[in-house]
Amino acid sequence: MATRPVFLSTTSGSAFIRIVHVDFVWFPGMTRSRKQMSIVSLHEAAKASAPGSRLLEVSSASENALGEKLSAFNLTFHARSQTREITVESAFQSAKVFENGGPYPDLTAARPLDAKRDPRLQNSGRLVAFRFSGQDWPLTPLTAFYDWIYVNALHRRSELAEAVLDYDAFSDISFNPEKSVNCQAGSVALYVSLKRRDLLQEALTSPDNYFKVISGADGKGVRNEDSMPAQLL
């Protein structure tokens, strides 16, 4: 057995995202087929915790082509500071600032997995901030910077942004909240919530407005993992 969160978008209330932790039968293995077996198991179990929800797996292992395209390893955007399309994952990793180094903008040109595994990210000391396109970002709320990059990238892919509105619950089979903080499925849920609440345009106007919008949810951020240690980012 395993437990994974399912992120539900909301249209009202104090939080933009409701998180349901689901117990399900886990199928060990790193192959795509084994991951998809676990996804099916998770979604079947999630029906009891979130009845009536339209559920989408957001990852490279998703059986749904939309969910696969929404993976941070596949979703690309054109940042103002870049001359080419970059993935959300590479952008996020490139922006990390540590006590003894960073950010490492060359990682925007790296393949997402290579960027994530770059040894400098492990050997530069404690994570202290993010810096991207000339903008500095604090570590709190913990998911704010990752969500900002993801929501902006998704908004620029109009066909994906429109299609994702057919869903209201999102999972990522590889995301383990005991080991990580940021989750692409949570970012999609945030996008859908902002769109349905007519707050998306305001949030995308500037980082300052974005912070104002998400802080209005519960005064801390949009998810309940704000107590997670920053080294997990």
Image (cartoon, helix red, strand yellow):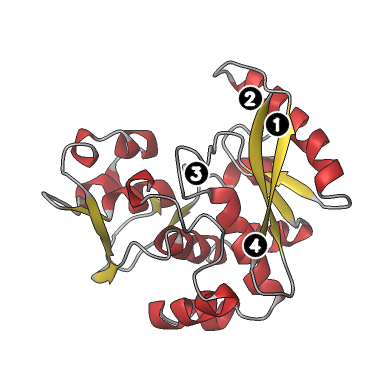
Residue 196 % position (x, y) = 71, 73
Q: Secondary structure at mark 4?
A: strand
Q: Residue furthest left?
A: 100
For label 1, the SS is helix
Foreground label between 4 and 2: 4
Q: CA distance from mark 4 to mark 3?
A: 23 Å
Residue occupying image coordinates x 52% and y 76%: 219
Label 2–label 1 contact, CB within 8 A: yes
**Point 67% across, 65% down: residue:** 192
Q: CA distance from mark 3 to mark 1?
A: 19 Å
* Pointer 1 residue: 39
Position of 109 relative to 129 (above/below): above
- Measured in 3D between alpha carbons, the distance from the residue under mark 2 to the one under mark 1, in whole angstroms, is 6 Å
Please identify the quarter of the rendering in which residue 77 is found: bottom left
- Above/below status of 75 relative to 157: above
On the picture, is 208 further left or further right than 175?
Answer: left
